[in-house]
Image (tube, rainbow, N blue to C red):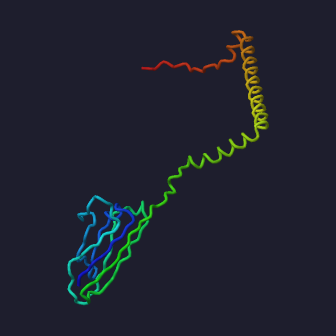
Amino acid sequence: TDLTVLVESDTPEHLRSLKAKLYRDEVVVHSMRLSDLKITPTFALTSVVLAFPPLTPDGRTYTLQLESSLSQASYTYSTQPVRFKADSSFRSARLAFFPQPRSHDSELSHTSYLVVPLLAVLTLLFYNQTAALRCFELVNSCVASLAAARENNTRAHHTQDAGLSDADALLVEPVGNKRKSKPRKT
């Protein structure tokens, strides 16, 4: 049985990533890597016809399967096997391979999610400029009054410390309790 297979793909790169395998009873009888084929580089092929070695017409079931070296993490694709019996003088099959690039949800990082609320706040500030300015002035006056209160508080502590005499300062210091050491008896 002569076997001819038409392999179709959407790009030449996807076509070059394929390997066609012919199985008989779960055992590989013949395999053909499409990247090894001598293809003329003058134009890009998106399909190719493969001619497998002749099979004995013994009525046994064969399976034709495509395998790709494309990453399953980057592409979504499935290859459907073709089953046939070697009971005639000629068999033809058509295999299609059209992988789809995976959409990467991980491309949106956490910083992308933080930008959305920031843009919403900036938009609200832009459209409510007068209210935002009043709010900013209120916060600024609160911060200024807190800073002034802190400065007055530190001045008051400095003036109190300056009014103390050296005798008063000695009373503040802790008294160290030392025990007298007894002389050793020898």
- Is 130 above or below relative to 57? above
Query: In which quarter of the view is residue 83 placed?
Result: bottom left
Image quarter hosting the C terminus: top left
**42 horizontally vs 116: left or right:** left
**44 horizontally vs 108: left or right:** left
Query: In which quarter of the view is residue 178 placed?
Result: top right
Say which residue appears at 27% left-offset and 73% top-offset: 50
Extreme-top residue of the structure:
166
- Is 67 above or below relative to 56? above
Q: Nearer the viewer, residue 180 or 120?
A: 120
Point out residue 39 in the picture as x, y percentages from the top left corner.
26, 63
Point out residue 22 in the picture as x, y percentages from the top left corner.
27, 77
Point out residue 168 in the picture as x, y percentages from the top left corner.
71, 13
Say which residue appears at 28% left-offset and 74% top-offset: 21
Say which residue appears at 29% left-offset and 87% top-offset: 85
- Is 179 above or below relative to 26? above
Image quarter hosting the N terminus: bottom left
Say which residue appears at 75% left-offset and 15% top-offset: 160
Point out residue 29 in the picture as x, y percentages from the top left corner.
23, 77
- Say how many tags the image has: 0
